[in-house]
């Protein structure tokens, strides 16, 4: 049945091409300073998502009809040397197809939401350009068949997320928090890149099927040794932890709530936060090679879940409460992956994404909903009993409360143990450099450091 | 002593040595200072009970302009729109040049024509400064600007070519004739040169432009020379003159000075902690785990939490912990701690007020909310204990101290006591900023070009003259310019409105027959269009309006509600309780449904909480999660359809249709359990007030509809702000329903008759509620309408239905997302969808664009297109007594409410990020009392951008149909109304009931107004007038041919 296979790869190409074309359309128009009207933007997004979704569904139906479980779409080999090659390749299997369909459905719905929500906002165009970049990144990452391709999508998702968090760039908070997230993402990207390098070193290529065995997901048998699997696995775990906000990176998740509601919904409720878990699912055959690796993942997942649960229960704003609730479930999903329950994790992931998106989108209805619930129940909403803490002493409770209110102090520790030494090191280098340049020029070599910030009084506000 | 032991002891009974009397009085003074400063905090309560109020309520005893400028300085916001914005309006024609001229003349009085150094008159100078944008900026920017742009090569745009050429020609003559010749010696010349103070600045220009070829300089070179000379002369002239610009008071907080000196903000550290803690303290039930020891108050809850060892590793927070433990050990009460902090910070007693006010305003939303929860504990589920705000200040100052020390140490290497920090930072600040010359010179430079002042003329000015010139220019600062602009902006609308009223009121009114039915609405300006459409649809109908609580002040609980809520203006505390009860036949059904509702509610709540917890979350998201995709997709893509389906299913658990209000209490005392309802006297009093206020004492029709209003929309934290303000931010349906029932009660009618109010036997009252978002009207107790009136009611309902559609249509012209070509029914469809759409940030326009308040008989305004901009209140001067009791009562209700709405919109519009709450999109509901921007910010007060977008910020113009004398009596009697008018927070005019002469209130008396036009445009129907327009519209007569025909017939009958 070569025609069917061809049809499937054709449809596969459409799935990937639709969001990428959207990026080019919106992006190029913005670069050329062609102001698109709201209606045009809406239509182009609708078209891209409907076409992409239909193609993805087509692939799914054909796969079911043909009982194929593994369709590969190759977009050429980019580097080829003896024992080493870099390929751009997309894989449609039981893992990637549901995730891609989820991405399309959630993004499509949220896009429809956002077109009305963002109506008349100054950054309308910018929002949807970044949105298109995100969607393209998401689809590329979810269908990636090689680690390089995955990295590409991963980067696009990270870039657009950070920029959307800093969407309100004229306020300090969003810029600060956007930067923090960007830094966390860089750490996670670096880990992923290192993993890619190690992988190439091990097998000469970044293709998942080489690493994870040729069988369709999730039945592959990884061929790596325990130590190799552990190293690659840990690097991937760091990458996943950064993206999914696992310990110690959990602090960025509430910070991401600076953007408009639809971006919070789609990034942190539904898709982006699950991308780390998805990466682990993708390489799950590898996890079987090393018991230690599995154990580390389970421990990290569970501790994140517990911590996020504790933090979530003291949050007093709806978006932070929802984001920690999200994190708690992501932690459990990661733990499930570590334990080897792959289908369970996948179903959990899909269900959680849908439910949380709905909750995020309805976040502003909270007052309305509480009022309706109170009327239905007939009294003030009861505080849910907090049973694990019922037995500990007041003093311990207060400490735990403080820990939860401080969001686990994770950011403070990161600042103190990683950021501060890092900054100190570079300031030291800077001081040495300036010492040298001053010495060589025989005078103050850097005028810029003399310029002071300019205070502007109220008179200048015009 | 362990921390917990110390805390369990009351702090004030600690081990402090007996304080001396002086110290006690000092502390008492401190407490009083804090209370005074707290008045500056926003007085917005929880967002669920949104009451519009004047944002600058604390300044109401000052005249408007002084107040907004003072407020702007204290709060760091704009007092008026930006100059650019006003200039745009000038170009657009919204501000007329004639108005600007007139306003300026009025403002200057006799000083207008004074000459300034023989250069121009003061009036001309100011007009020019208004018309031409004067750019300015920091010195660095200006230096760059003149160096890198054409500023010194081309005369600025907008200057007429005649002025430009003359300026260049004169300069050329001057240079060739005087200056260059003077170079060629001769004693006389040299002395002349001395006399002119030959500007050395010109030397460098000659060097630059190559003096040797001066004879062959091109026009462009002469232009450049002129401008460079001008710039040089201006800089030189300005250099030694003191500044006349209004000075901004120097920053008082350590943080401000440190920020200015180093660019590092110590408040960032403080706010990170404080916002989280405040939210936990204020929280009304969002967090599952409430703040431990919250009931002990802010200070002790804070020290219990932050005083314990552990916590964040940041050094300054560890120091805070140490300090808190010390305070707890020594049992220092909050007030003492504030005193101590102020001493450590080196703030002398004379600065207390300013320092503490600035400190409170640094996080004004949260501080304001704590104060509100303390003052109005009845409006929240978990009120704050007394003294919370004071404790907040104590905590804040402790955090401030350590954050300042940390920041100063890091940025300035400053380790001395904090009391020296302000001096140190101030010193650094002065070092880096020498007094600026260029920004001031640039103002003169720009004006000189517009007026064609040549360098020669300016160079002759001696020091004293420069002083005069600069004083003239600089005292007309940007705020002054905007003040004048704003007056002109208001004046245009004011003239139009008064002309329209004068023209409309002058028309003959025909005597009316008994109307088919009467409908009584709220005074809300959104009902203006609804009433107009209803009158157009059915011209034999009368509409009236009264404050939407219909003189029923009550605590109300619906059959399906959990608690009583107050339904009355916020200043009244109700004395009666009313509950909705289910008819006996339906009791069983009701109980069943209530049980189902409770079950469903509990399950939903469990799910809601469950998805956010650990194990049940996993279970729920894993199993049910995917199902959430159905509501997700359906509600977002098909909001209206989904809503219909939800309603269909909701029908099974809703309250049964047959309910009654328990209104008659008999002799029992009023109370929420046993004493529900009113006694007959109370009912009669309310009914009498209502009818007399309306002036509805005779001519009752067979059917009288009382229609309250409310608004319901999803995903909208500000929903309460769209509801009826007279009902305390809730829907006014129950009030209308209660009043209708009362008026139908036989006993009440008998008493009313004794008081001279005779209601015909065939008159039936029906209560209803108008949903201003979806434009639907719902009626109550329809089953009680006697069969004799069923037909009348059905006909009235049909009319209202048509009016609803048309009203929706008129509203749709304001929504960009609704095409202008919509039909009436499609428009209604559109507004219904808005209410149900989760992604809709503008469910309706609310009070936006309100500008007028007209108190008088409906026939004065009937048929006048007021574009949904006027609050309308019925009042019949002919029926008032000699003391004007009714007018006083009506105005006492109308003034604060309408002025509050209008001023809140004014401030939220002129500076949406400062006074308002900014764009709604990143809003995040916090603690169930308000919204924050994004992840963490101050609690945002005021209105969001999406609510005020189409507003025009003008002060409310009140037009009262009464005599000037009567109005003056009312003003003399009521201080709050008088204060608003006297200080110009609202504007006031009266329309004489008989002569129809309009008079405007100015400086304590009324002056006759002469209309500028006598005619108004005429349109056949409202739709004909507004169709195709999105923007604000002119006022017009609406005069359908049928009306004229019908009127003719009626007259014929008569």
Image: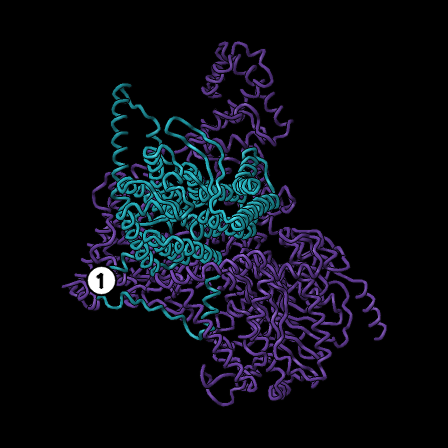
- Is B795 positioned to the left or the right of B307 in the image? right
Residue B246 in view in this figure: no
Callout 1: chain: A
Dot 1, crowdedness within 10 Å: few (<14), some or many (≥20)? Answer: few
Query: Could you say which is closer to the camera, residue B964 or residue B582?
Result: B582
Percent position (x, y) of residue B643? 57, 64
Percent position (x, y) of residue B310? 21, 54
Instruction: Give the number of marks.
Output: 1
Query: Could you say which is closer to the camera, residue A237 or residue A176?
Result: A237
Which residue in the rendered view is the most extreme toward the right? B1052
For residue B434, which quarter of the picture? top left
Q: Quadrant of the C terminus of chain B?
A: bottom right
Percent position (x, y) of residue A378? 44, 75
Which residue in the rendered view is the most extreme toward the bottom? B667
Query: Could you say which is closer to the camera, residue B262 or residue B600?
Result: B600
Which residue in the rendered view is the most extreme toward the front? A1
Query: Could you say which is closer to the camera, residue A88 or residue B72?
Result: A88
Q: Is residue B383 above or below residue B409?
A: below
Residue at 58% across / 45% down in the picture? A51
Chain identity for the colour purple used in the image: B
Colour scheme: by chain
Q: Is residue B448 above or below residue B627?
A: above
Chain identity for the colour cyan used in the image: A
Which residue is identified by label 1? A396
Residue B300 in view in this figure: yes
Percent position (x, y) of residue B531? 68, 66
Q: Secondary structure at mark 1?
A: helix
Q: Quadrant of the N terminus of chain B?
A: bottom left
């Amino acid at each position: 049945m070569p025609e069917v296979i061809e049809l499937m790869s054709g449809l596969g190409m459409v799935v990937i091409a639709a969001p990428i074309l959207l990026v080019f359309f919106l992006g190029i128009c913005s670069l050329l300073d062609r102001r698109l009207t709201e209606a045009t933007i809406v239509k182009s997004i609708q078209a891209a998502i409907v076409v992409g979704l239909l193609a993805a569904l087509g692939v799914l139906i054909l796969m079911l009809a043909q009982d194929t479980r593994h369709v590969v779409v190759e977009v050429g080999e980019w580097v080829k040397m003896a024992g080493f090659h870099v390929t751009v390749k997309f894989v449609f299997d039981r893992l990637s197809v549901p995730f891609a369909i989820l991405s399309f459905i959630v993004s499509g719905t949220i896009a429809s939401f956002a077109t009305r929500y963002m109506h008349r906002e100054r950054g309308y165009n910018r929002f949807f350009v970044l949105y298109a970049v995100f969607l393209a990144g998401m689809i590329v990452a979810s269908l990636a068949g090689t680690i390089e391709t995955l990295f590409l999508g991963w980067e696009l998702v990270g870039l657009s997320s950070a920029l959307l968090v800093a969407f309100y760039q004229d306020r300090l908070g969003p810029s600060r928090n956007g930067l923090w997230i960007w830094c966390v993402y860089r750490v996670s990207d670096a880990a992923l890149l290192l993993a890619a390098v190690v992988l190439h070193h091990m097998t000469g290529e970044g293709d998942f099927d080489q690493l994870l065995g040729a069988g369709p997901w999730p039945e592959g048998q990884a061929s790596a040794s325990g130590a190799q699997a552990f190293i690659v696995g840990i690097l991937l775990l760091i990458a996943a932890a950064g993206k999914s906000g696992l310990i110690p990176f959990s602090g960025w998740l509430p910070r991401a709530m600076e953007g408009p509601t639809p971006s919070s919904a789609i990034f942190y409720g539904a898709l982006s936060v699950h991308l780390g878990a998805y990466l682990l699912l993708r390489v799950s055959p590898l996890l079987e090679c090393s018991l230690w690796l599995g154990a580390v993942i389970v421990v990290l997942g569970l501790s994140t879940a517990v911590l996020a649960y504790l933090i979530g229960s003291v949050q007093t704003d709806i978006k932070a409460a929802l984001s920690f609730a999200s994190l708690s479930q992501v932690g459990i999903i990661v733990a499930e992956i570590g334990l080897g329950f792959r289908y369970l994790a996948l179903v959990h992931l899909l269900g959680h994404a849908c439910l949380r998106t709905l909750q995020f989108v309805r976040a502003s209805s909270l007052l309305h909903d509480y009022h309706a619930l109170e009327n239905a129940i007939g009294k003030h909403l009861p505080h849910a009993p907090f049973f694990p803490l019922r037995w500990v002493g007041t003093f311990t409770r207060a400490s735990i409360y403080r820990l939860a209110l401080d969001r686990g102090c994770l950011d403070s520790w990161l600042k103190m143990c990683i950021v501060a030494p890092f900054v100190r090191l570079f300031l030291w280098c800077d001081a040495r450099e300036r010492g040298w340049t001053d010495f060589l020029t025989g005078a103050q070599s850097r005028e810029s450091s003399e310029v002071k910030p300019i205070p502007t009084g109220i008179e200048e506000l015009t | 002593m362990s921390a917990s032991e110390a805390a369990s002891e009351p702090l004030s009974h600690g081990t402090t040595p007996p304080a001396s009397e002086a110290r006690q009085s000092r502390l008492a003074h401190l407490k009083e200072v804090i209370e005074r400063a707290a008045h500056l905090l926003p007085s917005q309560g929880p967002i669920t009970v949104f009451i519009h109020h004047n944002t600058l309520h604390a300044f109401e005893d000052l005249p408007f302009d002084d107040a907004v400028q003072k407020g702007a300085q204290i709060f760091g916001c704009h007092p008026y729109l930006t100059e650019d914005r006003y200039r745009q309006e000038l170009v657009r024609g919204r501000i007329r040049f004639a108005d600007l001229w007139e306003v300026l003349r009025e403002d200057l009085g006799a000083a207008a024509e004074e000459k300034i150094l023989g250069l121009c008159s003061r009036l001309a100078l100011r007009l020019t400064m208004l018309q031409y944008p004067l750019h300015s900026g920091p010195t660095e920017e200006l230096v760059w600007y003149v160096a890198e742009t054409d500023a010194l090569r081309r005369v600025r745009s907008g200057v007429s070519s005649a002025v430009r050429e003359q300026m260049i020609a004169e300069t050329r003559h001057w240079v060739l004739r005087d200056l260059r010749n003077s170079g060629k010696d001769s004693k006389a010349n040299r002395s002349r040169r001395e006399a002119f103070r030959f500007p050395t600045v010109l030397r460098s220009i000659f060097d630059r432009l190559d003096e040797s070829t001066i004879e062959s300089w091109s026009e462009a070179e002469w232009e450049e020379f002129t401008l460079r000379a001008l710039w040089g002369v201006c800089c030189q002239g300005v250099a030694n003159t003191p500044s006349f610009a209004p000075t901004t008071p120097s920053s008082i907080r350590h943080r401000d000075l440190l920020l200015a000196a180093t660019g590092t903000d110590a408040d960032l550290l403080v706010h990170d902690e404080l916002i989280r803690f405040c939210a936990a303290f204020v929280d009304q039930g969002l967090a599952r785990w409430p703040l431990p020891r919250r009931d002990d108050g802010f200070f002790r809850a804070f020290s219990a939490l932050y005083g314990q060892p552990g916590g964040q590793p940041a050094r300054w927070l560890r120091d805070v912990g140490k300090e808190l433990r010390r305070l707890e050990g020594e049992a220092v009460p909050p007030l003492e701690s504030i005193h101590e902090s102020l001493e450590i910070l080196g703030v002398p007693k004379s600065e207390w007020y300013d320092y503490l006010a600035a400190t409170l305003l640094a996080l004004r939303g949260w501080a304001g909310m704590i104060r509100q929860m303390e003052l109005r504990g009845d409006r929240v589920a978990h009120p704050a204990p007394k003294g919370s705000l004071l404790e907040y200040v104590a905590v804040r100052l402790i955090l401030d101290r350590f954050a300042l020390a940390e920041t100063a140490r890091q940025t300035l290497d400053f380790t001395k006591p904090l009391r020296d920090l302000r001096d140190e930072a101030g010193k650094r600040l002065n070092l880096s900023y020498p007094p600026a010359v260029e920004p001031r010179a640039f103002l003169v430079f720009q004006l000189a070009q517009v007026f064609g002042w040549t360098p020669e003329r300016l160079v002759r000015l001696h020091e004293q003259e420069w002083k005069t010139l600069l004083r003239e220019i600089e005292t007309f600062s940007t705020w002054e310019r905007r003040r004048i602009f704003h007056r002109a902006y208001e004046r245009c609308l004011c003239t139009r409105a008064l002309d329209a009223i004068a023209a409309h009121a002058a028309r003959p009114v025909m005597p009316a027959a008994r109307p088919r039915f009467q409908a009584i609405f709220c005074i809300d300006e959104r009902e203006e269009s609804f009433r107009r459409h209803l009158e157009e649809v059915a011209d034999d109908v009368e509409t009236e309006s009264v404050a939407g609580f219909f003189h029923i002040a009550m605590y109300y609980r619906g059959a399906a509600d959990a608690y009583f809520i107050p339904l009355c203006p916020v200043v009244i505390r109700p004395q009666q309780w009313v509950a909705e009860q289910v008819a006996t036949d339906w009791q069983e059904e009701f109980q069943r449904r209530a049980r189902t509702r409770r079950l469903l509610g509990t399950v939903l709540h469990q799910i809601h909480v469950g998805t956010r917890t650990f194990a049940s979350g996993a279970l729920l998201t894993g199993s049910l999660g995917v199902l959430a995709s159905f509501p997700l997709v359906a509600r977002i893509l098909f909001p209206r359809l989904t809503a219909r389906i939800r309603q269909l299913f909701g029908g099974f658990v809703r309250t049964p249709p047959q309910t009654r209000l328990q209104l008659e209490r008999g002799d029992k005392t009023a109370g929420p359990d046993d004493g529900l309802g009113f006694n007959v006297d109370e009912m009669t009093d309310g009914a009498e007030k209502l009818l007399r206020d309306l002036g509805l004492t005779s001519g009752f029709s067979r059917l009288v509809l009382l229609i309250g209003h409310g608004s319901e929309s999803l995903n909208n934290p500000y929903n309460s702000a769209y509801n009826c303000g007279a009902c305390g931010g809730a829907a006014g349906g129950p009030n209308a329903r209660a009043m209708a029932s009362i008026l139908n009660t036989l006993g009440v009618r008998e008493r009313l008759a004794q008081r001279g109010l005779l209601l015909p036997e065939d008159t039936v009252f029906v209560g209803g509620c108008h949903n201003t978002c979806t434009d639907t009207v719902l009626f109550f107790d329809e089953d009680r309408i006697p069969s004799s009136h069923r037909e009348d009611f059905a006909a009235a309902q049909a009319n209202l239905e048509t009016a609803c559609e048309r009203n929706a249509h008129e509203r749709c012209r304001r929504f960009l997302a609704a095409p202008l070509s919509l039909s009436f029914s499609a428009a209604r469809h559109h507004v219904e969808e808005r209410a149900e759409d989760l992604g809709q940030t503008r469910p309706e326009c609310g009070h936006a664009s309100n500008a007028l308040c007209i108190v008088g008989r409906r026939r004065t305004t009937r048929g006048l297109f007021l574009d949904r901009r006027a609050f309308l209140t019925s009042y019949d001067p002919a029926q008032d007594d000699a003391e004007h009791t009714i007018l006083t009562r009506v105005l006492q209700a109308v003034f604060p409410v309408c002025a509050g709405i209008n001023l809140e919109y004014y401030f939220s519009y002129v500076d949406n990020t400062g006074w308002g709450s900014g764009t709604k999109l990143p809003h995040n509901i916090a603690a169930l009392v308000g919204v924050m921007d994004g992840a963490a910010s101050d609690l945002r007060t005021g209105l969001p951008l999406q609510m005020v977008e189409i507003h025009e910020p003008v002060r409310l113009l009140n037009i009262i149909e009464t005599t000037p004398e009567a109005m003056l009596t009312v003003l003399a009697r009521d201080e709050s109304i008088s204060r608003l008018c006297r200080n110009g927070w609202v504007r006031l005019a009266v329309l004489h009931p008989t002569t129809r002469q309009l008079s405007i209130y100015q400086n304590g008396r009324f002056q006759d107004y002469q209309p500028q036009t006598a005619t108004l445009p005429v349109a056949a129907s409202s739709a004909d007038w507004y169709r195709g327009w999105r923007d604000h519209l002119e006022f017009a007569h609406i005069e359908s041919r049928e009306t004229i025909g019908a009127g003719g017939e009626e007259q014929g009958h008569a």
